[in-house]
Image (cartoon, rainbow, N blue to C red):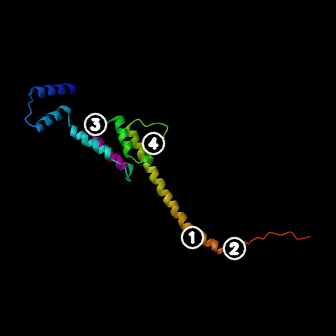
Amino acid sequence: MADVWKENVMEDLEEGALEYESVEEFLIAIKKEFGGGKKELVKVAELKKLEQGERMMEEFVQEFRRAARGSGYKGYLLIEEFKEGMNATIRRRLMEIENQLDSIEQWFRRATALDQNWRESRREEERLKGKQGEMIPKQQKQRQMMPQPLVWQRRQKMPS
């Protein structure tokens, strides 16, 4: 369909029989023929620049869904854009799983679960690190109160 329209426009241009009074009118005709291309291009550009950064995966997924609507991206292309924007650690772990993910919804669910687990493990590490930090001074105090160990000297053989 696009090729036919292109041929017709080219013929009209060669014959000087264009019905457009301005470039704006011509662009409106192109838009009508090919759809809202500008809107799709804006959505695609928005998708391409999205990055998770330090945000929670849930927030990133919501923003990604919003940007994906109207982009024209589906299936593999949508998954690729999502992978590009997520944190490298989560992407790597998802790529290493045995059962590869086939749909964008599976990617959203698994990425969100991994992100939640990762954040929970970081909180747990911080909590444990804090407990260890509190315990060290107590252990040091106990050591200071304990008597110093005896220093053993080697027994030397008596000369015969």
Q: CA distance from mark 1 to mark 3?
A: 61 Å
- Whichever of labels 2 and 4 marks the residue nearer the N terminus, that label is 4
Residue bearing the label numbered 1: 137
Instruction: Look at the numbered discs 2 and 1 and tell me whether their residues touch, using CB distance below 8 Å.
Output: no
Kindly identify which numbered label has been placed on residue 94.
4
Front disc: 2 or 1? 2
> In the visual, does 4 lie left or right of 105?
left
Per the image, label 3 sits on a secondary structure element best described as loop
The CA distance from mark 2 to mark 1 is 18 Å
Q: Position of residue 35 (x, y in %)?
A: 20, 34
Nearer the N terminus, badge 2 or badge 1? 1
To which residue does mark 2 refer? 148
**Closest to the observer, 115 or 149:** 149
Where does label 3 land, which residue?
72
- Secondary structure mostly seen in magenta is helix
Alpha carbon of mark 2 to alpha carbon of mark 3: how far?
A: 76 Å
Q: Are marks 1 and 4 in contact (CB under 8 Å)?
A: no
Q: Quadrant of residue 160 in the image? A: bottom right
Three-letter amino acid code of the residue under disc 1: Pro
Badge 2 amino acid: Gln
* Residue 15, picture quadrant: top left
Q: Position of residue 98 (x, y in %)?
A: 49, 37
